[in-house]
Image (cartoon, rainbow, N blue to C red):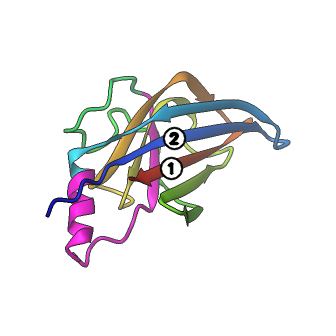
Amino acid sequence: MRINLAVKGKVKITVRDLSGKAIQRVEASNLVVSAGRNLLTDWLIGQNYVSGLLYVGVGSSNQAPALTDTDLIQPIGPRKQATDRFRTQNVATISTFFGSQDNNGVWRETGIFQNQTGAPMFARAVFSPEIVKDQSKTVTVDWDIEVT
């Protein structure tokens, strides 16, 4: 018996000024990279090191995602721990808040990871328009991962 599962998703990024007003919204599709597919397969067979998708990173590269990606191309600052994780039917949402002092720079890419450093990266997305993140802004990055 063969079961066909598809894992796909999108990233929704909301930029706010310090008063909390949304000033920019960006959406992009992501690519579940080979390491992410392996991570999912390890979870299916009960590997005990699979703890979930806990960290989000951002970077400045606009290079297209590739299956062989294992990290962001040009990371900006450290990965941030997810601030909220929940499931609605077959969609998992991982939400991460970046405060005004966090990861400032020109954002063009984001990735979702199991660990704070090192591998594995589950998925990567490149988005446009870019986000100029500075001390006058906060950002929420929401990864929606759908299994069909």
Instruction: Indicate the quadrant containing the N terminus: top left, top right, bottom left or bottom right.
Output: bottom left
Query: Mark 1: which amino acid?
Result: Asp
**Position of residue 88 measured from the top left corner of the image (x, y, whole percent):** 57, 62
**Position of residue 84 measured from the top left corner of the image (x, y, whole percent):** 59, 63
- Cα gap from disc 1 to disc 2, whole angstroms: 6 Å
First to last magenta residue range: 36-60
Q: Residue pushed farthest right?
A: 19
Is residue 129 visible in this depiction of the protein?
yes
Q: Which residue is mark 2?
A: 11
Q: Which residue is mark 1?
A: 144
Query: Mark 2: which amino acid?
Result: Val
Is residue 79 visible in this depiction of the protein?
no
Residue in the image at 32% along x and 33% along y = 73
88 left or right of 25? left
Looking at the image, which is closer to me, 86 or 76?
86
Looking at the image, which is closer to me, 44 or 51?
44
Residue 92 vertical placement versus 27 (above, below): below
> Mark number for residue 41?
none
Residue in the image at 31% along x and 31% along y = 65
| Label 2 crowd (10 A; few <14 / some 14-19 / many >=20) | many
Does residue 50 belong to the magenta stretch? yes
